[in-house]
Structure formats: C-alpha cells, structure tokens
Amino acid sequence: MKKDEFINTIKEALQRDGELTEDMVLAELEEWDSLAALSIIAIFDKYFSIKYKYNDISKLYNIGDLIKLANGKLE
C-alpha cells in the first residue's frame, strides 16, 4: 500500500470529508474518538497484519505518527 492510499484509508475510517495531512493533530480532528481509534487498529490488522492495542493508538499525536506505525510497510 502506498502512503497516499493509507491516508485515504484512514480518511475513510474517520468518515472525514476534508483534507487529511501528516501534520494534522488527531485530538483536534472532529472525527477522532475512541471508535475512530478502534477503526485504525482494524486497518493495521487487516492491511499489515500488525496488532496494536487501544493504548498504543490513543497515545499518538498526529497522522504522521500513524504512518510511522506502519513499520516501513508503505511503498
């Protein structure tokens, strides 16, 4: 998966209509809540076979941190 595809997948999971960039702060996104974090966990499991816990995701600061968690699996 390419980085822009990953960002679009996150955008779909968040049900966000607007732009989503690496420097956007998760806590400042209207769509960011505990259900969104669980959706992100499901994305990592489905596309990368990486299992994270809620606490791992809830500590992240921005979209760029989510990209870093992909552990180099993005093209």
Image: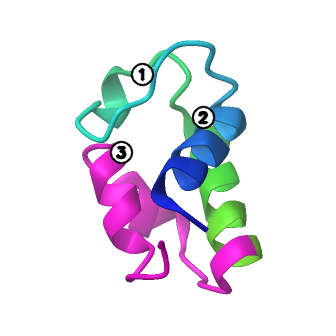
* In the image, residue 46 above or below residue 41: below
* In the image, residue 27 above or below residue 49: above
Is 59 part of what is drawn in magenta? Answer: yes
* In the image, residue 58 above or below residue 31: below
Q: Label 3: which residue?
A: 63
Please, what secondary structure does the residue beneath circle 1 have?
Answer: loop
Q: Label 1: which residue?
A: 29
Residue at the image point whose x is 34% and y is 30% from the top: 27
Is 44 part of what is drawn in magenta? Answer: no
Q: Label 2: which residue?
A: 11
Spot occupied by residue 12 in the image (x, y as percentages of width and height): 70, 35
Q: Earlier in the sequence, mark 2 or mark 3?
A: 2
Residue at the image point whose x is 61% and y is 68% from the top: 1
Spot occupied by residue 51 in the image (x, y as percentages of width and height): 61, 83
Q: CA distance from mark 2 to mark 3?
A: 10 Å
Please, what secondary structure does the residue beneath circle 3 have?
Answer: helix
Total residue callouts? 3
The amino acid type, in three-letter code, at marker 1 is Leu
Nearer the observer: mark 3 or 1; the answer is: 3
Give the crowd class for mark 2: few <14, some 14-19, many >=20 residues within 10 Å: some
Q: Which residues are magenta?
A: 47-75
Q: Earlier in the sequence, mark 3 or mark 1?
A: 1
Spot occupied by residue 46 in the image (x, y as percentages of width and height): 76, 73
Q: How is the image coloured?
A: rainbow
**In the figure, is residue 56 to the left or right of 8?**
left
Give the crowd class for mark 1: few <14, some 14-19, many >=20 residues within 10 Å: few
Q: CA distance from mark 3 to mark 1?
A: 10 Å
The amino acid type, in three-letter code, at marker 2 is Lys
The amino acid type, in three-letter code, at marker 3 is Ile
